[in-house]
Amino acid sequence: MIVLISGATHTGKTALAQQLTERYKIPYFSIDHLKMGLIRSGQTPLTVNDDEKLTPYLWSIVKEMVKTAIENRQDMIVEGCYIPFDCKNDFDDSYLRHIKHYCLVMTERYIENNFDDILRFENTIERRSCAGDINKNELIEENRRNFALCEKYGVERIIIDGSYCADIEL
């Protein structure tokens, strides 16, 4: 099984992937690691600020990794904000039956009530070079947009509202 975990920045994608890895002994792959490897090695002229260009560039690689894992009957968790909402269009049915896509979405209320905690926990799994550079209103808007895109493309949402609770039973 391939588990795709997407969502806005700071929603806990990496923490959830780490939790699932520990529980189910399935390796996880962070698209951010691929991004930084390609940028630091000079394999791409893109930078960390090129999000709109990075999604199609990185996804073109990751989707082939997903296909290879399925063909080899390997389980994998893939997490990152560079998973397109319409990614199902990149796979035929023989692949899709092995893929589950979840998107973490924080409600506006959760962000308003917990913004300080969101910042406090931003380095729990990975060290962010831009720690603290997040804007509350932009985070709210990104989560609203992701909620709507999940609805449009049929991506299963994990809603983070009253308290932080993101979990998946595989």
Image (cartoon, rainbow, N blue to C red):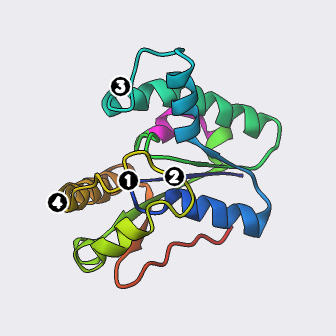
Q: Residue 3: x and y, percent?
A: 62, 53
Q: Nearer the viewer, residue 106 or 168?
A: 106
In the image, is residue 15 part of the stretch drawn in magenta? Answer: no
In the image, is residue 89 part of the stretch drawn in magenta? Answer: yes
Q: What's the mark number on residue 127? A: 2
Q: Which residue is mark 4?
A: 137
Q: CA distance from mark 4 to mark 1?
A: 17 Å
Q: Which residue is mark 1?
A: 131
Q: Amino acid at mark 1?
A: Ala
Q: Amino acid at mark 3?
A: Lys
**At 28% from the left edge and 59% from the top edge, which residue is drawn?**
143
Graded by Cα atoms within 10 Å as few (under 14), some (14 to 19) or many (20 or more), the crowding at tag 2 reads: few
**Residue 50 sits in quarter:** top left
**Pointer 2 and pointer 1: residues touching (CB < 8 Å)?**
yes
**Pointer 3 and pointer 1: residues touching (CB < 8 Å)?**
no
Q: What's the mark number on residue 53? A: 3
Graded by Cα atoms within 10 Å as few (under 14), some (14 to 19) or many (20 or more), the crowding at tag 3 reads: few
Q: CA distance from mark 3 to mark 1?
A: 22 Å
Q: CA distance from mark 3 to mark 4?
A: 23 Å
Q: Please give left or right for residue 9 compared with residue 97 in the image.
A: left
Q: Please give left or right for residue 133 compared with residue 42 in the image.
A: left
Q: Residue 12: x and y, percent?
A: 48, 63
**At 74% from the left edge and 70% from the top edge, which residue is drawn?**
23
The kind of secondary structure element at disc 1 is loop
- Is residue 169 shown above or below 7? below
